[in-house]
Image (cartoon, helix red, strand yellow):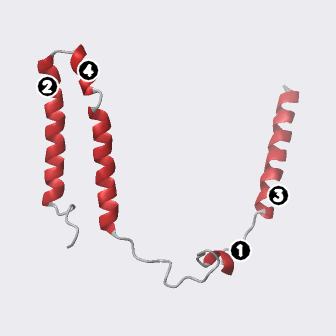
Amino acid sequence: MLLTSSSIMISMIISMILISVCAIISKKSKNNREKMTPFECGFDPKSSSRMPFSIQFFMIAIIFLIFDVEIVILMPTIKIMQMTKVKSWFIVTSTFLIILVIGLYHEWKNGILEWTN
């Protein structure tokens, strides 16, 4: 019992020493001028590197990803149709597609698909 508690204490002390040494060694200046400037193949940038982000591109990308995942969900339904009854397959698939169409309609009505405001 004494051996295990002393080995635990030694391992804790060694761990704390290593963590402290790593923290001291890896101190970096927060305001390093070279790291704060943008880099364009060795040349100074012609304009600001902090240009505003267009939310339209982001929304179109998110909508694309959502519909892409939904297509992946729909792909196995053809194989499932062979294993189940056609009526239950049709109900599940049509319910899923109706939910997709309602979501698309909602996005359209909220103006998410409009490119210009």
| Residue at figure coordinates x 30%, y 47% from the top left | 66
Q: Quadrant of the C terminus?
A: bottom left
Amino acid at the residue labelled 3: Val
Q: Nearer the viewer, mark 2 or mark 1?
A: 2
Q: Is residue 108 above or below residue 11?
A: below
Query: Residue 15 appears at what percent x and percent y?
Result: 80, 46
Q: Residues within 10 Å of mark 3 (few under 14, many from 20)?
A: few
| Residue at figure coordinates x 21%, y 15% from the top left | 84
How far apart marks 3 and 2 lie (CA) works out to 65 Å
- Find numbered disc 4 in the image and state the secondary structure of the residue it sits on: helix
How far apart marks 4 and 2 lie (CA) works out to 11 Å
Q: Which residue is mark 1?
A: 29
**Earlier sequence position, callout 4 versus callout 1:** 1
Return the residue nearer the eye: 76 or 25: 76
Q: Nearer the viewer, mark 3 or mark 2?
A: 2
Q: Tell me if label 3 and label 2 are in contact, CB under 8 Å.
A: no
Inspect this view and state whether residue 32 appears. no
Q: Residues within 10 Å of mark 1 (few under 14, many from 20)?
A: few
- Find numbered disc 1 in the image and state the secondary structure of the residue it sits on: loop
Q: Which residue is mark 2?
A: 90
Q: Which residue is mark 4?
A: 80
Q: Is residue 7 above or below residue 22?
A: above
Amino acid at the residue labelled 1: Ser
How far apart marks 4 and 1 lie (CA) works out to 59 Å
- Find numbered disc 3 in the image and state the secondary structure of the residue it sits on: helix
